[in-house]
Image (cartoon, helix red, strand yellow):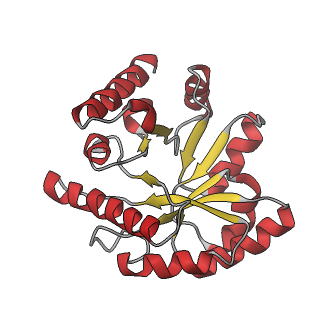
Amino acid sequence: MQQQLLRIQQRIAEACVAVGRSASEVRLLPVSKTFAHERVQQAIDLGLTRFGENRVQDIRTRVEHFNDSTLAWVMIGHAQTNKAKDIARYASELQSLDRLSLAQALQQRLELEQRTLPVFIQVKTAQEVSKSGLEPDELLGFLQQLNGFDRLLPQGLMTMATQTTDQTEVRRCFAQLRQLRDQALEQGFESVQRLSMGMSGDFELAIAEGATDVRVGSALFGTRD
């Protein structure tokens, strides 16, 4: 796994150099979903401490297995409102906040847990039915509503690009998210700085369009079963 990690770090650095950015601007989020605890331990041994999971029940399992407060477990999958209790208790960050009902449920549960939760708002930039997220024209209104939820700490925006080999379409998705982030900043939502976009197959394109967080699974851990 060490060679895979070095290769990913090299790819990030080269992508940054190509567009005049510093590699220090880009944060790697290893996506550990579906991989065995033993594989995750190998990543921990290499110094990685933040991991992305698609299901909150898997985050709970990781927390209970590793029992290490220095590790951070990030919820990146579609979050069901009825899972707010476990998200509030176990997740260190949520990158898929996409509706008011979820924000309300999380606020209530976070008050009980006496915690705050960093969140990314997921925006739907692809037209595929399978993709989740706010419609782009709903973002500013949603951010305004979030001002009433003091337990939720907006960090930035997240998207998943269209699943296609057409790089122009993939870059369009990423560029749209960057433009939406810039509009949010212009409207005074100063905390919405980060852009979580790009995965194993397309994170160089995401970095070219301004990604600050890339979510990489198979390129690090190998092919999923």
Observer-nearest of 81 and 146: 146
Q: Is residue 12 above or below residue 59?
A: above
> In the displayed structure, does residue 159 sit left or right of residue 37?
left
Q: From the image, which quarter does the C terminus lie in? A: top left
**The image quarter in which residue 119 lies:** bottom right
Residue depicted at 76% across the width and 34% down the height: 68
Q: From the image, which quarter does the N terminus lie in? A: top left
Observer-nearest of 156 and 32: 156
Residue depicted at 78% across the width and 36% down the height: 67
Q: Residue furthest top?
A: 3
The location of residue 184, given as percent across then percent down, is 44, 69
Q: Is residue 165 above or below residue 98?
A: above
Q: Is residue 24 above or below residue 7?
A: below
> In the displayed structure, does residue 43 sit left or right of residue 217?
right
**The image quarter in which residue 221 lies:** top left
Q: Is residue 167 above or below residue 10?
A: below
